[in-house]
Image (cartoon, grey):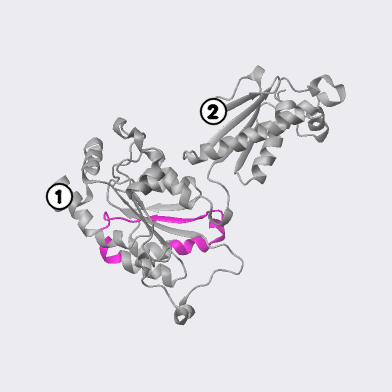
Amino acid sequence: MDTHSTPDLPSELPPDAAEAAPALELARASGAVQAPRAGMAPGTPGGAGVPDAADSGNRIEPEAGALPRRVCIVTGLSGSGKSTAMQVFEDLGYFTVDGLPASMAAEMVKLMEKPSMAHFKGIVLGLDIRETSFLDEIQDALEALRHAGYGPELMFLEADTPEIMRRYVTTRRPHPLEREGIGLERAVHLERTRLAGLRGSSDMVVNTTRFSIHDLRRVIQRRFRSPQGGLRALRVNVFSFGFKYGIPAEADYVFDLRFLPNPYFVSELRARSGQDPEVSDYVFATPKAREFRAKLLDLLFFILPLVENEGRYRLTVAFGCTGGRHRSVAVAEAVRKALAQAGYPVALEHRHMALG
């Protein structure tokens, strides 16, 4: 499907756009991100085609007690950042399909009913003018999704014409409409004209002219990251390690725990690990150790929302002691438990526990 890639967003803002951060606040102030029009229900472009009570017999109702998973359609002007947006959704735990013919949208969304798809938060379809029948099929596709019981949200990405042209010149890729025998600038204007109606019926319009990849990630995360109080977007990797074997290269934060009481010098605890309650109790037996644990968690819970708001989707925190078997393992286990209880997706690895 995704056979004709288009230019995407720069990894960083250009120098003259540094003042654009924070991106979302600027976008809202300048109209870069627009909310649904008055009277529109979320997921119902233009407010049209919403089944009323009389149409309820044609709807496929979700199972009782089941949380509805989101269906999002990402579309817009070529070169405005759709590929980047699809990657962000994938990182957030959505099933994504790009370059799909609009006529296949309902069939693809129905796949989410399979048990094997239950771990996805929802589905995101990338639909655009690369498909020759796109304009003829998109409204019928949205209508079919609504009548099948889904509430598709339509996100429209755009950028100013000079910026889109700059991205195409930089990547040296052809615009999809240049196949009609016209130049780049005219192709951009023609696509904007053809998609004007679709833009007007969208639930969310995002202008990416001054956005970096990270700016667009922030905008999407703030709207789609945690429906119905689900897991946060930021994934935390927690490592324990032994300094004598080396610090994990991927660690963003490293904590040296060699000041804590060392179970290695207690003969009945030496062969055990920090996963054993007796070892953990020994490590946190002193008031200072327990105070450190409390302040460590306070620090992490202060940092993590700030990192998440910057659009990061992964943070790695490493805890080290001499051999990586006792103190670092006990602290890493305590941190993993606290973060999981707070709703963060956490991965835990005891890198040197078997060696310590």
Report the magenta residues as a range: 109-137
Residue 302 vs residue 184, the one in the foreground: 302
| 122 in relation to 245, above or below | below
Camera sees residue 351: no
| 262 in relation to 19, above or below | above
* Residue located farthest toward the top when viewing the structure as drawn: 244
Give coordinates of residue 164: x percent, y percent: 24, 43
- Left or right of 102 in this view: 110: right
Q: Secondary structure at mark 1?
A: helix
Disc sitting over residue 39 in the figure: none
- Left or right of 330 in this view: 219: left
- Amino acid type, mark 1: Arg
Q: Which residue is mark 1?
A: 186
Give coordinates of residue 84: x percent, y percent: 38, 44
Q: Which residue is mark 2?
A: 250
Q: Quadrant of residue 204?
A: bottom left
Q: Report crowding for label 2: few under 14, some 14 to 19, many 20 or more residues within 10 A (C-alpha).
A: few
Residue at the spot 44% in from the left edge and 44% down from the top edge? 218
Q: Quadrant of the C terminus?
A: top right
Residue 122 vs residue 284, the one in the foreground: 284
Mark earlier in primary sequence (2, 1): 1
